[in-house]
Image (cartoon, rainbow, N blue to C red):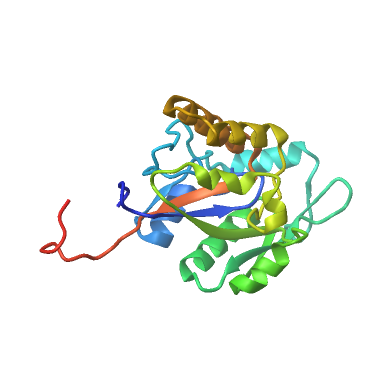
Amino acid sequence: FFNDTATTEIYTLSLHDALPIYYTELAQVVWQGYATPAGGLLPVGNKFYDPNLTPYQFNLTLANQILNDAGYKMGPNGVRVSPSGIPLSYTLYVINEAPEEVEAANIIAGWWSQIGVKATVDAVDAGTLASIIWPNFTQDFDLWDWFTSPALPTLLDVFLANQTETGTSDSGYNNSAYDALYGQMITATNYTTVYKDAYELQQMLYQDLPYIMLYYVKSIEAYNAQAFTG
């Protein structure tokens, strides 16, 4: 499933607090076990995957405590309000062509409701979601996916600042240190530098959270065992 010939599908969610998401349950319930909880953007089968990155811990009690301590008071309707009076009520967009991900979005919305965050799931077609995201990033949250090859670290380029102009970045991430390090990686002349830089780039994303990586979906393909070997 994750090998040097498989393409891996990676689902991501754009938000900034991973605590109210139970990755393992999502992978089991939505994909019946045919997915692996994610820590970083590059998946397990990728040569440059960083094994040191693990999913953030699922802890609704701690998530509630963090919001309480930050002054987000629970309203009478079960929705928290920011210190400036803004309700924590959002739209969670998801592609309607992916029923598994619509289910995942609804599960996530259920978890968020337990910490006083209202998420209204809106399943739309890809073109509609693209028009919501680009060019002004008007979405609250969006759940979408990436496909990547097993041998390259170049998927990491979706977080370059110049990708916000080309419509590749759907997070709007802008970090000059990240851009410089990616440039160093892509022009390196030895694998040692490429591995080191790829790991550091993934660690920067892990800390900054332009995405929350949800899971890597196993790529299953049928083939004729009499015609293909290896």
Q: How many marks?
A: 0
Question: Position of 75 compared to 153: left or right?
Answer: right
Pick the residue in front: 116 or 182.
182
Is 67 situated left or right of 46 in this image?
right
Q: What's the residue at 47%, 43% (across, down)?
A: 42
Image quarter for residue 129? Answer: bottom right
Figure quadrant of residue 152: top left
The residue nearer to you, when weighing 109 against 98, is: 98
Q: Is residue 165 visible?
A: yes
Name the residue nearer the viewer: 72 or 56. 56
- Residue in the picture at 40% in, 42% down: 46
Residue 13 in the image: above or below residue 62? below
Vertical placement of residue 46 versus 88, above or below: above
Residue 187 position within the rendered picture, expressed as x and y whole percent measured from the top left = 55, 34
Relative image position of residue 150 (x, y in whole percent) = 38, 47
**Residue shown at 59% from the left, 71% from the top:** 126
